[in-house]
Structures are given as structure tokens and as C-alpha cells.
Image: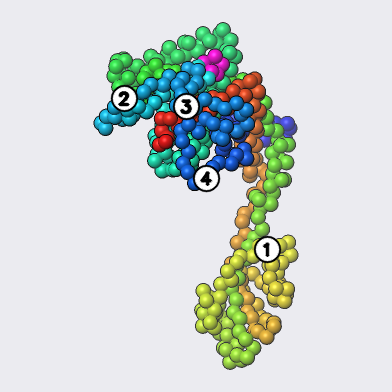
Amino acid sequence: MSRASDSWRFPIRSSCLTIKLMFLMAFACGCGSSGINRPTGRPLALGEFASDALVSGRRNPVPAPLAPPAEPGLTVAEGEPRDQGREGSVETGKPVIIESLVGQVSGRPIFADSLLEPIADQLRRESERLTTQQFVQQAAQIVNARLNEVVLSELFLAEAQAALTPQQQQGLLAFLKAFRERTLAEGFGSLSQRERELQQEQGISVDEYVELERNRVLIANLINEKIEPRVIVSWKDVQREYERRKAEFNPPAKVTLRRIRLSNDQPQEIERVKSRLAAGDDFASVAESAGESNGGLWDADFPIGPGGISDIDINEAYKPYLSGLSAGQTTEAIEHDGRTIWLHIDKIDQPAPRGLYDLQRQLAEELYFRRRAEQRDRYIKSLFDKGIYSELEEMSRRVLLVALMRYGRG
């Protein structure tokens, strides 16, 4: 690899493309550091879900959800008699939201149903598990995460569609036509056969399958044009990253010690240990017979400093006796503080050094993905700065209102 200002670029793996929102929102329902004080000792009623007590920073109270119509585009119907065999039925007289337009992104309407369907089972489980007040907080987090995902996807798709040249639009249409034909060919040319297969495998239709591929291609193209050109990793960047993390890649060697400690008022036992060690008996066996547990193994490995085997973090009185020893060797008897001590070098663990040229590919990839994430975050912020960010709080509040009426126990 040249030392010049080389740079690495890695192809996007479109099939693994995942869009994630990387910065925080203030939850519209008092989750987070809003400083809201909630009453304690009683459950919350549905009518309180839209009150100022649960909406941070809002000056005007929101209409109660039980007073239809509560929101523009919100359709509320009286509940039908409960049918125990029919999922989703409601009790007589209890209002139920049929549909709600919660907002628009790039001119495209966003409905509560499309947002809540993928998280409905999760909300039901949380509603059964939590108290009403806990469910409000947990539902706000779940709904916000889902809303962020959908809004960001819509923003990316709108930008991607707008960025296409006429030639690219024609190419996309041709690509999707060929993709649809290949999809049908997998069902032996039968639309109904392929529909059944996709419904069984993924729960979608052929048209939805083609739409997903269209969105994938559009977003991949947008990233290639708006984000990838700004992601550059030079050879100098790799060198600096290696120097910054050099200690991580070249950790010091570590020594494992065993020891025997006897009081100086045990002269016979001291002589016996000296005799056995001089005869070459196994240190661990001698340590066990001298009353040390686990063969006298010290319960810590010591990093070796620049000064060698004696440059470790132990009592200074021991260090001169370790100087010059290697693995498998034992010190002379050390008399210190009323005791006689022997240290044995059980093993020395010396990791193989890892130089810059061994790690250059790994470091280049790490830097690339880190910088691509940074550029993606900047681009996401630029999309939200166009005005949609200020609308997210209202959209989140509306979706949460529907979620609480459908899945809450109040």
C-alpha cells in the first residue's frame, strides 16, 4: 500500500442497508428530563393522556381523547358488543379509533394504522404487564422509535426520488420491470403462485415486494451520491489512528506468580521447603504441602514494565530476587517482615506485537464506517432541519393518543 494520500472506499452492501435515527428527540409524553411531576397513588385515566401533565412544553391543553372528534382526520366510533371469538372487538359504549391521519412527510400522508401495526403486539404485551402510568411512558418510547424510523425512511425516499435524473428514472423503471419479471419467474410465471409464496414467507404481495426493492435501490443510490463522496480515509488517518491506539494493539507481557509464605517461627517447615525445592520438586506441590491453597497461585497477573520481569507491581523487597529469572524458575528464600517467602514464575504471557502494516486494513475499515456514520448523521440532521423536526412532536402525540386508546387498559 502506498504511503501517498491513498484513501479507501468500500462498496455499500445494499441488501444489509439499515436506516437508523442517531440523535435524540424529546418525548411528547413527559419521558426524559422534562421535569414533570405526576400524581402518585392512583392510576391515570384516559382523559389525562392528552393533558398538559403529559405533554412537555405545550401551552394549550390538548382535547381529551374521549371527546370526538379529538383530532383532525381522527375518526371515532362507538364500540360494538364484545365478541369473544373476534380479535380486536371492543366493549359496548367504549369509543374506538378507526383511523387517524397523524401528519405528512414530503406530501405523503402518514396514518396511525401503518405506524402501529408493526408494534401492536409489543404494545399489547406492555399494556398487560405494566401499570397504566408505566404503560404511558413505555408506549411513548416505543411509538417515538417507530415514528422516527418511518419519518426518516420517508424523508430519505423523497430525497432519493427528487435526486433522480430523467435518465436514472427511466433506468429505475426498466430495472423494476426486469425485477418483477424475475420475481414472477420464481413462481413459474404464475402471479397467484408467487403471491402465495411471498405471503407465506414474508407476509407481503408481489407489488409490495417490488416496492421494497424500489425503495432499497433509491436509498442506496442516495447514499452513494450524498454520503459516500464525503467519506474519505487517507493513509495518514490510518497512521494517526494506529499511534493513538498503539498501547491497545501492543499490550505489555504479563507474569503469573506462585508463592510460599511461612512464618519465621516455623524453622523445620522452612528447612523442609528449602530441601524439596533444591531437589527440584514441583513448586505447586510444595506450596500445597506448606499450607498454600491452589498451589500457591497468586490471584493476579502482573503486567511487566520496561524494566523486565522485576518491573511489576509487587512489594519492592521482592523485586531484586526476581531480576534475571525466566518462566519456571524460583527465587531464593526471601526473608521479609517476619516471614520467609519464595516466589515462582509460573508463566509469562507475551502477546505477539501487532504493527501498523498488520492492522492497516482493519483500521481503515473502522475509520471508514465511523466517518460514514458521522456523515449520515449530518445528512439526517439536514433533512430534519428543513422543517419536519418541529412537526414530529405533534405527530408523536397523535400516534400515542391512538395507541393508548387502542391498547391501554384505562
Question: Which residue is denoted by mark 2 in the rendering?
Answer: 80
* Residue 188 rendering spot, x and y as whole percentages: 30, 17
Name which residue type carries label 2.
Glu
276 lies above or below 33: below
> Who comes first in sequence, dot 4 or dot 2?
4
Viewer-nearest of discs 1 and 2: 2
Viewer-nearest of discs 1 and 3: 3
* Residue 192 rendering spot, x and y as whole percentages: 29, 16
- Whole-Å distance between the Cαs marked 4 and 3? 22 Å
Figure label count: 4
Q: Quadrant of the N terminus?
A: top right
> Who comes first in sequence, dot 2 or dot 3?
3
Residue 304: mark in rendering: 1
Is disc 2 placed on a helix, strand or loop? Answer: loop
- Whole-Å distance between the Cαs marked 2 and 3? 18 Å
Discs 2, 3 touching: Cβ within 8 Å: no
Q: Residue at x 65, y 50 (%)?
A: 249
View extreme (left): residue: 85
> Who comes first in sequence, dot 4 or dot 3?
4
Question: Which residue is denoted by mark 4 in the rendering?
Answer: 40
* Residue 42 rendering spot, x and y as whole percentages: 47, 43
Q: Which residues are magenta?
A: 104-108
- Whole-Å distance between the Cαs marked 1 and 2? 77 Å
> Who comes first in sequence, dot 4 or dot 1?
4
- Whole-Å distance between the Cαs marked 4 and 1? 58 Å
Name which residue type carries label 1.
Ile
Is disc 4 placed on a helix, strand or loop? Answer: loop
Q: Residue at x 54, y 42 (%)?
A: 39
The residue nearer to you, when weighing 211 against 259, is 211
Residue 108: mark in rendering: none
Question: Which residue is denoted by mark 3 in the rendering?
Answer: 65
